[in-house]
């Protein structure tokens, strides 16, 4: 009777681990995408947006995956509409990227913004980037450029990413451990 209770307890870890896995994957997805503030087409080249709370924000480039795209030769410029001051924009060296084999989304830049109204526009990047872009042959001209989109998202700290990865590992261990120990309980707990 005692072994059956132990088996049931360990098998209960499987649904508990499944729920924890669901929420930790949801947390990881939120880290990668953040809360969308605004988005605009590369062809439009500029838009206004409102920041409700001060914090770090990220500029993401969304384009056709595995294609040459002129969007990567552009650098965003964010200006506070009230003070007319440009914000300091930093390159995201290890920014997250998401690819679904049709479109790719990558965090390219990030900046800090106070509460207020801002405008974001695209300007030419360094000559090196443009020269690199021109050196790559393009097989289907114009198709990938027309689908390019710039997004501004709320940036989450790296702590969320580390925490969610650890939560995923812990959830998987709960599922596997609950299943294996539940099966082997009569041999382990003699």
Image: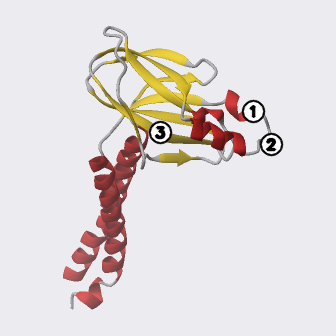
Q: Is residue 190 left or right of residue 166?
A: left
Q: Residues within 10 Å of mark 1 (few under 14, many from 20)?
A: few
Residue at point 80%, 42% (across, down): 139
| Residue 129 x %, y % | 58, 40
Q: Is residue 179 left or right of residue 103?
A: left
Q: Residue furthest top?
A: 82
Q: In this rendering, which labeled residue sits more in front, label 1 or label 3?
A: 3
Quadrant of the rendered image containing residue 135 = top right
Residue at point 30%, 64% (across, down): 170
Q: Which mark is residue 174?
A: none
Q: Looking at the image, is mark 2 or mark 3 earlier in the sequence?
A: 3
Q: Is residue 69 above or below residue 184?
A: above
Give the residue pinned by disc 1: 143
Give the residue pinned by disc 2: 139
Give the residue pinned by disc 3: 108
Q: Is residue 166 above or below residue 29?
A: below
Q: Is residue 181 above or below residue 144?
A: below
The mark tally for this picture is 3
| Residue 160 x %, y % | 29, 47
Q: Looking at the image, is mark 1 or mark 3 earlier in the sequence?
A: 3
**Circles 2 and 3: CB distance less than 8 Å?**
no
Q: Is residue 104 above or below residue 150?
A: below
Mark 1: secondary structure: helix
Q: Quadrant of the C terminus?
A: bottom left
């Amino acid at each position: 009777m005692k072994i059956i209770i132990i088996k049931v307890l360990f098998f209960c870890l499987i649904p508990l681990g499944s729920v924890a896995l669901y929420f930790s994957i949801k947390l990881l997805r939120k880290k990668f995408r953040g809360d969308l503030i605004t988005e605009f087409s590369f062809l439009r080249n500029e838009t206004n947006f409102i920041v409700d709370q001060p914090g770090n924000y990220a500029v993401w480039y969304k384009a056709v995956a595995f294609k040459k795209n002129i969007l990567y030769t552009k650098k965003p410029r964010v200006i506070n509409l009230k003070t007319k001051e440009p914000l300091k924009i930093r390159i995201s060296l290890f920014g997250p990227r998401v690819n679904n084999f049709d479109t790719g989304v990558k965090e390219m830049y990030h900046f800090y913004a106070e509460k207020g109204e801002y405008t974001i526009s695209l300007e030419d990047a360094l000559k090196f980037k443009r020269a690199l872009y021109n050196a790559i042959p393009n097989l289907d001209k114009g198709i990938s450029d027309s689908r390019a989109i710039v997004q501004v998202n709320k940036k989450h700290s790296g702590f969320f990413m580390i925490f969610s990865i650890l939560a995923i590992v812990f959830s998987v261990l709960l599922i596997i451990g609950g299943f294996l120990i539940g099966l082997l309980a009569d041999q382990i707990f003699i």
